[in-house]
Image (spheres, rainbow, N blue to C red):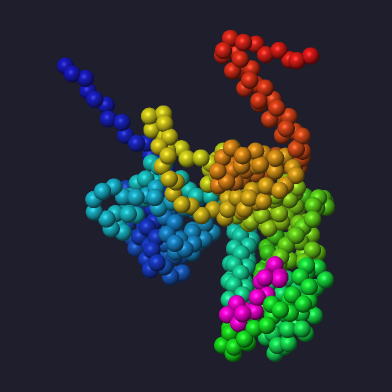
Amino acid sequence: MGRKRLKRRLQVVYPDCAGIDVGSREHWVAVDPAVTDESVRCFSSFSDDLEALADWLDSVGVVQVAMESTGVYWIPAYEVLDQRGFEVFLVNARATRQVSGRKSDVLDCQWIWELMSHGLLRGAFRPADKVCTLRAAVRQRATKVADQARCVAHMQKALVQMNVQLDQVVSDLTGKTGMAIVRAIVSGERDPDKLAKLRDCRVRASEQTIARSLRGNWRAEHLFALAQALEHFDFLARQVAECDTRIEQSMAALPVLMSDPPAPGKRLKSMHRSTARQKQLHRALCEVLGVDLTAIPCISVDTALVIAGEIGPDLSRFPTSQHFCSWLTLAPSTCISGGKSLGKKQHKVVNRAGQALKQAASNARASQSFIGACHRARLARMDTSKAIKATAHQLARLIYAMLTQGQPYVEKGMDAHEQQRHHRQLYALQRKARKMGFKLVEAA
């Protein structure tokens, strides 16, 4: 008699779960057919139907809910279900792709439920609700700052069209001298000599040079564009200030983890905030995070604010620093087959915290610190983009250790990096000598 082939079945991990196919107008929901005759139902995206959806899931005994991260349409449903006490799993749409065959909303929600019941889906990281409030304010401020940059580009374009070469003598149009001259031009001043007298003493160019650069044609259409760009710039500046106020209010609502924050160990520079506001924000960040992330070289208040908004102080969702770096999209690819890396291009994932760390790592070239020395050594042996990603990975590991262990950052100094490099070179020479049958002897 031949052997009976045993069929291995997938084990049910979440028996009381549901799957939701999220849409802009309606949501299709599937539950276990064994608990109800109508296992698939459709609900509209209106608020009263979302409450009815939560009532129906509660009546059939659902505990876990899995839904796709479709645009921003999942946010209202997620918030309603989370407030009602369900364990909501926000899953990537790539993980719920249907097998080849027919496709419909009914099949999609049933497929999500089946994958979830067998534990084949993992939920995305979403910080606490109060941290999400801070995150929304930080993202809104970043959007307004980007809009301001476009307004500056429009002002510069209008000046160039009038042949006003202010950018040739002033490095920053939004500085004290640049904005004073632009506002005077919009107010009606056309005399280059009078405009040049608005020069700040810190500007290297002389008044005569600035006056030469301000001799333009002053066409009406370009002046109109310049005035509108300046008005839009001022409007956005007021909105950025309002965002800063909302950020401070959101941070005040978070629990305090450090009662006596230390003073900043470096100069806090910002193009859009005053020094007093920077210090106030630094103190609030220390209280919320429990550590001073700005003590790390290259980590500014803006970078620490992005980390506080995108992640928060609780990193218990990430078991190790490797998981944390992978979520930040700073880890190398793991596409391996036959023991070899396939070199497959990773999916493009926008992670604002990871991008902020990359931006901080790009500024490490001139840093006279241990991290700066490590970054310069990487630039000497690899491409710039890879070196920046590796340094950002190093910063992420430091941040993970500080937030999970609550220990302050200790600067090793450039001498420590030189000693490590010397030990590595000595070890490599000894290994090569042993391989060739020789022995290194230290010179007297």
Left or right for 259, reference 293: right
Q: Using residue 284 as the reference point, say whether residue 161 is left or right of it.
A: left
Residue 42 lies in quadrant: bottom left
Q: Is 295 or 254 nearer to us in this picture?
A: 295
Q: Residue at x 72, y 47 (%)?
A: 367
Residue 382 vs residue 353, the one in the foreground: 382
Q: Is residue 23 left or right of residue 412?
A: left
Front-most of 387 and 250?
A: 387
| Percent position of residue 275, x then y | 79, 63
The quadrant of the picture occupied by the N terminus is top left
Q: Residue furthest top?
A: 437
Name the quadrant containing residue 173: bottom right
Q: In this image, 94 relative to 352: left or right? A: left
- Is residue 100 shown to the viewer in this render? yes
Task: Please say whether residue 270 is one of the residues in the magenta stretch.
Answer: no
Q: How many marks?
A: 0
Residue at the spot 65% in from the left edge and 38% down from the top edge: 377
Residue 398 image position (x, y, % from top left): 67, 41
Q: Measured along the vertical axis of the image, is residue 62 above or below residue 137?
A: above
Residue range highlighted in magenta = 158-172
Residue 35 visible in rendering: no
Residue at coordinates 59% horizontally, 67% vertically from top-left? 146
Q: Residue at x 50, y 50 (%)?
A: 124
Please, is residue 187 above or below residue 212 in the view? below
- Image spot of residue 197 (x, y percent): 80, 80
